[in-house]
Image (cartoon, rainbow, N blue to C red):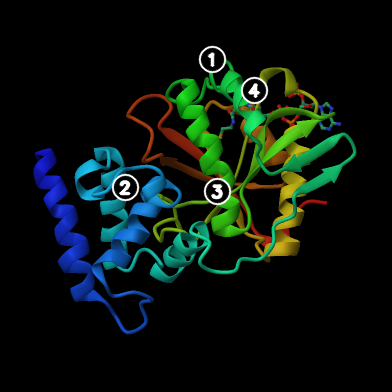
């Protein structure tokens, strides 16, 4: 399909199909509200901070695709529009959100919100082929900057997210929780936004000290205590034994494999899924 045709489909989705389908329990019914919610999610924050209006003409095609997929999921009842609306309004400062602690601490380990000076060490670890061995490719400096921004804005949207991890005052990567905002092909993963994932990525010289596991335990305690979230998943490319070992140390239970929809066909596509259900939280 041509770019112009896809952009026309987007307009039809937000200007006609979603308003026509609006149900009494939906929080919005006007075209510009649907556009706001879907575009904010495609950009991971208020869309005008990322793209010049009009979005239907200027949004890069991959982000437009994300917005269309999300809109189709709303129409199909596979995404909670009230949740999406709350996340969008939180990014815009239009609703009050519960305060998020500045940091969680345990001994030499600090989990904190992201800071601008994390940019350089984060770009360095994302450019390291050893760290990125189980990702399709290392990230560029620009991609890392975007990713850091997206990580921190998750705290605004959800009240939790991937924390910047410091050991002895030095940024070493992230560990934390992500609300999964795409449909995943594993049981319970079809409804967008329902599943919470644990994730971690540390600089090579921070491996082998137990930091990821300790930080994940702090994250789990915070998620349970402050957010009431006890059931989480984690997944990684099949050969990533170090990451799987973290999941196992946390007491997570293997739950099969699935093809990761965001990973191109190839040896990294098959992912192992692990689950932590409330009764399994390890001490
Ligand atoms: C996945 C990753 C975070 C795991 O890091 P890690 O340091 O191996 O994991 P842990 O924090 O659980 O540390 C365990 C290691 O620390 C050692 N260790 C040292 N002191 C320890 C302590 N006090 N407590 C626990 N473990 C300790 C363990 O023996 C183990 O080392 P070993 O595997 O060499 O035996 C790291 O490899 C990484 O960032 N990889 C790249 C990014 C990535 O693939 N992320 C996952 C994508 S889904």
What residue is at 59 percent from the left and 45 percent from the top? 152
Label 4 and label 1: CA atoms lie apart by 15 Å
Q: Can you say whether 114 is above or below 157 in the image? A: above
Label 2 and label 3: CA atoms lie apart by 18 Å
Residue 134 image offset from top left, x and y in percent: 51, 25
Mark 4 or 1, nearer chain start: 4
Give the labeled residue for mark 2: 66
* Local SS, label 3: helix
* Local SS, label 2: helix
Disc 1 CB within 8 Å of nearest ligand 1 atom = no
145 on left or right of 79: right
Residue 232 image offset from top left, x and y in percent: 60, 54
Label 4 and label 2: CA atoms lie apart by 29 Å
* Local SS, label 4: helix
Q: Can you say whether 79 is above or below 111 in the image? A: below
Query: 10 Å neighbourhood of mark 1: few (<14), some, or many (≥20)?
Result: some
Disc 2 CB within 8 Å of nearest ligand 1 atom = no
**Front residue of this view, candidates 6 and 222:** 6
Identify the disc placed on residue 121: 4
Query: 10 Å neighbourhood of mark 2: few (<14), some, or many (≥20)?
Result: some
**Front residue of this view, candidates 162 and 27:** 27
Q: Quadrant of the N terminus?
A: top left
Identify the disc placed on residue 153: 3
**Front residue of this view, candidates 66 and 273:** 66
7 on left or right of 163: left
Give the labeled residue for mark 1: 129
92 on left or right of 117: left
Label 3 and label 4: CA atoms lie apart by 19 Å
């Amino acid at each position: 399909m041509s770019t112009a045709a896809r952009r026309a489909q987007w307009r039809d989705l937000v200007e006609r199909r979603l308003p026509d389908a609006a149900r009494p329990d939906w929080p919005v019914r006007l075209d510009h509200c649907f556009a706001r919610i879907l575009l904010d999610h495609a950009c991971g924050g208020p869309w005008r901070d990322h793209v010049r209006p009009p979005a239907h003409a200027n949004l890069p095609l991959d982000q437009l695709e994300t917005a269309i997929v999300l809109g189709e999921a709303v129409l199909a009842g596979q995404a909670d529009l009230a949740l999406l609306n709350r996340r969008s309004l939180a990014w815009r400062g239009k609703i009050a959100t519960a305060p998020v602690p500045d940091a969680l601490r345990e001994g030499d380990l600090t989990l904190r919100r992201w800071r601008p000076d994390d940019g350089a060490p984060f770009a360095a670890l994302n450019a390291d082929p050893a760290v990125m061995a189980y990702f399709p490719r290392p990230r560029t400096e620009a991609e890392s900057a975007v990713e850091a921004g997206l990580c921190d804005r998750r705290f605004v949207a959800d009240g939790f997210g991937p924390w910047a991890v410091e050991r002895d005052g030095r940024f070493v990567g992230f560990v934390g929780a992500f609300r999964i905002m795409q449909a995943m092909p594993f049981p319970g993963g079809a409804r967008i936004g329902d599943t919470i994932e644990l994730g971690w990525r540390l600089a090579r010289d921070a491996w082998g000290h137990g930091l990821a596991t300790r930080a994940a335990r702090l994250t789990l305690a915070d998620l349970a205590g402050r957010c009431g979230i006890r059931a989480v998943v984690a997944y990684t490319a099949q050969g990533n034994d170090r990451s799987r070992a973290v999941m196992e140390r946390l007491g997570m239970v293997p739950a099969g494999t699935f093809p990761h929809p965001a990973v191109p066909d190839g040896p990294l596509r098959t992912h192992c899924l692990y689950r932590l259900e409330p009764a399994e939280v390890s001490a």
